[in-house]
Image (cartoon, rainbow, N blue to C red):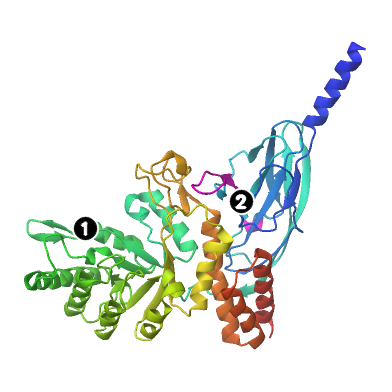
Amino acid sequence: MKRISILLACISIACIHAASPEVSMVADPLETYYSLTGKTGGQPAALRFCGGEAGIAAFSVYNSSADTMYCRIGLTGLNSLKPVIREAVHIRARLGQLPADVLPEISADGVIVIPAGENRQVFIDLPTNAKPGHYHGTFTTTNVMDNTTTVNPLNIEILPLTLPEKHPLSIMTWDCSLRGATDAGRQKILELLTESRVNAFHVLERPELKDGKYDFTELNAMLAVLKGKGLAMLRCAAPPRNINVLTEKGYAEYVEYLKLVIDNVKKQGYGYDDFILYPYDENVQNNFFAAAKASKAADPKVMVYADPTTKATPEEMQRLVDGNYVDYFQYNASFFRDRGDIVKPLMKHVRYNTIYWCPVIQKRLRPHSFYRQMGRSAYRYQLHGVGYWTSLWMADGKSMPWDDFQGKTASPVTIYPGRDNDADSIPSRRWRAFRIGLEDYLFFDLARQKGNVELEKKIDTAVRNPQSFAAANALKNEITNFLMEK
């Protein structure tokens, strides 16, 4: 009897170890909130993308056994696409739950750990330069305890339609980490920015006053890094601390300072369309008005940037337009919700009309319903650009990007540094959603250019009202089919 019991126990243990991971394709690969326990529903494993589009997918891997499972992940048959496999990592975000937001590449051994009765998600990034065609592969999961494996089909179609490489919008994120990073770390951050179509860069470097002369060495180094990448937004346009721009003497000194700045930037090979003066942040009061006026006095061809909040008065906004002192207005998103009456009369007089968001506690916000909507909002309000604060903020000693409860303040990152704040840079689901929203804009704009009244009505409804991921995907497929018609 004792031998039988031992035998049954061994059989039982073997059965537990032999449990195969249960896999389903996630219906909304952008969703960060889902239960860690229990199996999640799925959808057929078939994907359809255009060239230049951010192809993404996610699989849920469930451990139905009573033991922790070490599960090796693999993709077969898709080597020519060069997909990147990522593990969706949960973090603690203030005022939120446990969003599975961070998307580090899966470990070199391809193994993820799944506690008993729980699921984990695996996120897949597809390249944007894949050749058109049908690709047939499999998503495989193996329990390393006994090599029991599940094989799930993954069929991908890359359509013979390519999104424009250059985005018509001016896109920025106030990213400040380029300043703190160097070499490979800086290059990785820049790649993550540009692959999501960021083409306007917040440049913080200022010339130093040495022996009565301004030294532009640090600024020029950053200008060299950013040359050809897009618009350089120069915060060194702010008056130096020893200059009071509101006095006659200070104003005159400031004009001469700006002439030096502008002349230096032009010597670095930047044209007037390649840089913009950014004297003050979220300010259109008297000091900004004086600074903007001085900028045009220094060089009438130079562009000036302003990002007013809803505290700005109609008079402050109007005088900038009347004097042609501002070329790029980036309005806080609340303008269009609360004070559209101020914005609309000004828009026809300004070269760039754009929108920005600045939420303090960002990681709790859902990627699809918040970050994806940024590009759609630009289309809805017929704007020239979009931005939000921030992408990657280097360690400041006050916040910990991977855990909002470990610091004094919540970290607003959408691109994460490595766990040890090293040179690594890791995208988030929210970062992917931001890019997909910008691609929505491209699909909508292409449909508008080709002309389809019924589709334009559907697009107008979509940008005014929240859509589910499935509905957004269905609209994109309808637009794609229309664009492919001869």
Residue type pointed to by label 1: Thr
- In the rendered image, residue 215, in percent from the top left (x then y), is placed at 16, 59
Q: Quadrant of the N terminus?
A: top right
Q: Residues within 10 Å of mark 2 (few under 14, many from 20)?
A: some
Residue 166, above or below 130 = below
Residue 18, above or below 257 = above
Residue 82, magenta (yes or no): yes
Q: Quadrant of residue 354?
A: bottom left
Residue numbers of the magenta segment: 80-98
> Which mark is on residue 217?
1
Whole-Å distance between the Cαs marked 2 and 1?
46 Å
Residue type pointed to by label 2: Tyr
Residue 165 in view of the camera = no
Q: Residues within 10 Å of mark 1 (few under 14, many from 20)?
A: few
Q: Residue at x 17, y 77 (%)?
A: 298
Left of 446 or right of it: where is 193?
left
- Sooner in the amino-acid sequence: mark 2 or mark 1: 2
Residue 339, magenta (yes or no): no
Q: Quadrant of residue 81?
A: bottom right
Question: What residue is disc 2 on?
Answer: 33
- In the rendered image, residue 387, in percent from the top left (x then y), is placed at 43, 66
Q: Residue furthest right?
A: 1
- In the rendered image, residue 101, in percent from the top left (x then y), is placed at 55, 50
Q: Secondary structure at mark 2?
A: loop
